[in-house]
Image: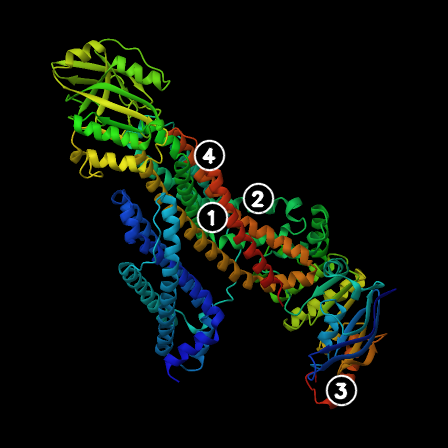
Amino acid sequence: MTLYSLATRNIRRNAKTYLLYLYPMVFSIVIYFTFVSLQYNKQIIDSMTVYGKLEPAFQTASILLFFFAAAFIWFSNAFFTRSRKKEVALYSLFGIEKKQIGKLLFYENIILGIASLCIGLLLGILLSKLFAMILIKLMGTTIIAKLSLSIKAVFQTIIGFMLIIVFTSMHNYRLIYRHSLLQLMKAEKKAEKRPKKASWLAALLAIFFIGAGYSIILQPSDASFWNDYGFQAIIGSFILMLIGTYLFVQAFIMFILQKLTQMKGFYFKGINLISITHLFYRIKGNVLILSVIAMLSTFTLFALGTTFSLYSDMNNISKKNFPYSIMYTVPDAEKETAIEKLMIENGQEQIKSAERIDYLEMNGNLSEIRRVPNDFPIILLSESTYQLLAEKRGLETTQFSENEAITFYDGNLDQSSDPFTGKKVSLADNNTVTIAAYEDYTLLNLDIYVFPMVVKDELYQQLEKDGLSKELQIYSLKNEKSAKELDQKLSELFYIDPYADFAAKGENIFSSFYHNYHKFFQVYGLLIFISAFLGFVFLLATGSMLHYKLLTEATADQPRYQILKKIGMSPSQLRKSIAKQLIFIYLIPLIIAISHSSIIIIALSSFLGMSMMNSFMMTIGAYLTMYLIYYFVTLSKYTEIVSKG
Amino acid sequence: MVVLEAAGVKKVYGERGNVNLALKNIDLQITAGEFVGIMGPSGAGKSTLLNVLSTIDFPTGGYIKINDKNIMNLSENELARFRREQLGFIFQDFNLLDTLTAKENIALPLALSSIPAKEIESRIERISELLGIEKILDQYPYELSGGQQQRTAAARAIITNPSLIFADEPTGALDSKSAYNLLQTLSVLNEKENATILMVTHDAYAASFCKRVLVIKDGVIFTEIYKGEQSRKQFFQSIIDILATLGGGGHHDII
């Protein structure tokens, strides 16, 4: 019998064990391939007007996925080889050379790897259409997804995973050399020792680290250090939470359990004695995996909660940033008639209001502002225009005096802070104005790439000779969300390339609500898709890691439960005890993750000045449901294994 | 008072075509305060009998009553409770939980029955003193010698004041000195605590500590020997003599 035939025969005979290894491999490949083929899907790229800006998000996510897949396969491989150590030892006892055993394991892994690559790619091709449809739906575009195969995605997947497979195969080849025969024989019978005394110092540190991380991130958003050390502070607080989480699982929980064992009245009551001592071992063996799940879940809950609430808040955000349906600098007469025709095509009855205002375009020195380039074009509006526009929208206006100016919300993420008041702007003719107030609304649509400022009527007239006097036409339409045709035709009229960036647009203003609204849809639809996708993968993968890890421990636990049964632990007590232990284990990462992500979301929502709680609660709800399914599956399997025999 | 009563107990293993009659027709009575040994060659059905009597396994025929309660009519949960409250077990391989300290192991059956912690502590204190294991209570099984482990197991068996203690080859994994100590302990429990003990063994020396020895062969009770007024040495001799007569069957594992 050749080694090759022994390897194939092995795989056929022990199908069940091998399947447990095959599933995670196929899963990783499917997920990765699906994601990468979406990334290269021409249809999606073409339909996305904003793709260029989001490519990094896609790129990062796919790299993240790859490393995650590698770790997942590595873990499954370790799990798989551990369950086969005895078999390997037997080969050795029967006199097969080490080199041959190594080769056998090597071939096996290669065969399994190639098989799962084929299956994974096939499933991936089918699934990628489904996911493409979901993505397109989320982005609010109306194209029909075709089943298209991206050669680039296929190659990238094959090369990436062949690397992983060869690497794990080599690792398996070394298995027989890494362990002595005795170690291999006893592989599954390692005596567990009671964890060392949990140190109260480490438990205290866990709370301290997590608390410090929280308090940094919960600093009020107008605290001055955010401006100077914002990025470092966020990274720092995440690192603190990360260390805190590990210590929390490793020391704090142990400490609590230990305190429980000292409360004899509680400890010696019913199944607590068994449940608590077993928890010690279960948690000790899974500190790393529980911490990883906690952190990945934090990420998922946070990313999903954020994108989801932005997505559902899209109407408000769009309305806030783009108060007018159409806004453009009045062009020459020929174009004007064309525009009028388009407006009539769109329907006169759709026009809610129309306004024509004067503005003055000029250059000045914005160096104190620091939020825009120093020579950014400024447009000046007179106080009376300002009052007219604000009044129409029912907004408050601010009184100001000569040589002062008013500025507006400019899309600043942190809406509570005022970046302008008190700063000086110099205009033509040696006129310098001081910014007297910052309104937390925008007077015009935001995507106009000029700096709008309101000055007194007298100053406005005085400056008219130094700037370009222009007129701005403003429309509010009823059908602003669906006026696709109008938007398209207007853009064609105003720009040769409607999606060119600011520099190519010339100095005339054109802005449409429709365009911006749908750009939002694409951006957040895509972000939601990526975070949901990653979140789902993380949950599935870490969940099954924990699942299988616990099940191996169940096998090791089986004799103990046999003893308990003989002593007189009833089946219902046994079930209850296991349910208690497992719910505790499953709840640890979940509670940590909910706590972490709530804090981050609270900080973020106060920073953005919007309420995210509803969407976040829904995210938690969905996550909890999937997570509980895992718990119940593990519980029933665990009980089954333990009660056997 | 009769603690255990078994009549016509039968146990069949295997299915159609490949039937193995492990117990043929066993009648047995044990009264309170007895120390009964069950002996017999390998394959005679000793362990099967013990398993069946101790509710770990179910007989195919006949009935078993413990304290006048027919154990065949109990549900899984009731059986567990019954085992916990009425029976004590000592196994050849100790069957201590390696995840618990000696003390926690002993406390286990009481905890499962929801006895108050104070009561548990005081009972453990008394029993461990009796068995001479009070110094090792906080140690884990892997830190203990075989003899210490088995005495811990004995403490766990006796702690609930059971009606009946089953001991399955309790000395099987012990060296001779530890075995002697353990058997002494069992005798003490029998005499001082008035514990009723049923012990399965294939070792005539161990059996000589009993007050009555049942010898089974091929699934039936072959004979019964009473210690009566004999000394332990004399009783040992009479057991050996009986076992010698069994030899014809081709099983010589005792002699």
Q: What chain letter is assigned to the residue under label 1?
A: A
Disc on res. A54: none
- The image quarter containing residue B171 is bottom right
Nearer to us: label 1 or label 2? 1
Nearer to us: label 1 or label 4? 4
Q: What chain letter is assigned to the residue under label 2?
A: A
For label 2, the residue is: A259
Amino acid tagged 4: Met
For label 1, the residue is: A250
Same-subunit check for callouts 1 and 4 = yes
Alpha-carbon distance for marks 3 and 2?
Answer: 59 Å
Asked if labels 2 and 4 touch by Cβ distance under 8 angstroms, the answer is no
Q: What element carries label 3?
A: helix
In primary-sequence order, the first of circles 1 and 4 is 1
The answer to whether residue A49 is above or below residue A401 is below
Alpha-carbon distance for marks 3 and 1?
Answer: 61 Å
| Residue B218 appears in the figure | yes
Q: Which quadrant, please, contains the C terminus of chain A? A: bottom right
Nearer to us: label 3 or label 1? 1
For label 4, the residue is: A613
Characterize the local packing of mark 3: few (<14), some (14-19) or many (20 or more) Cα atoms within 10 angstroms.
some
- The image quarter containing residue A439 is top left
For label 3, the residue is: B246
- The image quarter containing residue A392 is top left
Amino acid tagged 1: Gln
Q: What chain letter is assigned to the residue under label 4?
A: A
In primary-sequence order, the first of circles 1 and 2 is 1
Characterize the local packing of mark 1: few (<14), some (14-19) or many (20 or more) Cα atoms within 10 angstroms.
many
Nearer to us: label 4 or label 2? 4
Asked if labels 4 and 1 touch by Cβ distance under 8 angstroms, the answer is no
Q: What chain letter is assigned to the residue under label 3?
A: B
